[in-house]
Amino acid sequence: MAQPRTGSPPAVPAGLAIGQAVGQAESVLTRLLAGVLAETGTSRETYLALQRLSAHGDAAGRADYLRDLADWLGLDLWAAGELADAMVAARLLSLADGTVRLAGAGAELRDRIRDSIGDITAPLWATFDPSDLETTVRTLREISTRARALR
């Protein structure tokens, strides 16, 4: 028979605690996103590629965009190129003079997904102090930046 625990549980290292908390939150939020993406018939990679172009002001040189997609989505350059080409063929992006730009259909899709996710999560975010959320975002961005530098 197992002995009942007495005293405090062992301390969890900060990095492990953060990793577990972020992983759990990411898992739940990803499932919410997956539901919205299924409703729109959009792959996760397509949505993330639209988001990455947004980080570039909705336009970027093709080579830079492909390197960014490869890096952020964990793709090789060939797969990133295939993804971008498929999005151009679907008229979500346009390509002219070596520059990838967000097309009207891509902007509409990205906005529809963002709005749907916003409708689902707005009540959740409303329960938090805005300054706590700002601190969390700032901290997670810095963790991401520093962790990427370790690779």
Image (cartoon, rainbow, N blue to C red):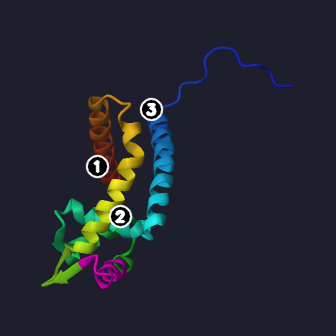
Q: Nearer the viewer, residue 83 or 124?
A: 124
User: What amino acid is found at the position of numbered circle 1 in the picture?
Assistant: Thr
Mark 2: which secondary structure? helix
What is the CA distance from the residue labelled 3 to the residue labelled 2?
Answer: 29 Å
- Residue 87 inside the magenta-drawn segment: yes
- Cβ atoms under marks 1 and 2 closer than 8 Å: no
Side of 41 where 143 appears, left or right: left
Mark 3: which secondary structure? helix
User: At 82% across and 25% down in the image, what residue appears?
Assistant: 2
What residue range appears in magenta?
81-93
User: What amino acid is found at the position of numbered circle 2 in the picture?
Assistant: Leu
User: At 22% across and 59% down in the image, what residue appears?
Assistant: 55
* Label 3 or label 2, whichever comes before in sequence order: 3
Side of 61 where 41 appears, left or right: right
Mark 3 highlights which residue? 14
Mark 1 highlights which residue? 145
Number of residues whose C-alpha sits closer than 10 Å to that of mark 2, classed few (under 14), some (14–19) or many (20 or more): some
Q: Nearer the viewer, residue 140 or 51?
A: 51
Instruction: Say if residue 68 shows up in the picture.
Output: no
What's the mark number on residue 48?
2
What is the CA distance from the residue labelled 1 to the residue labelled 2?
Answer: 18 Å
Measuring from the top left, give residue 50's x and y in whole percent. 30, 66
What is the CA distance from the residue labelled 3 to the residue labelled 1?
Answer: 18 Å
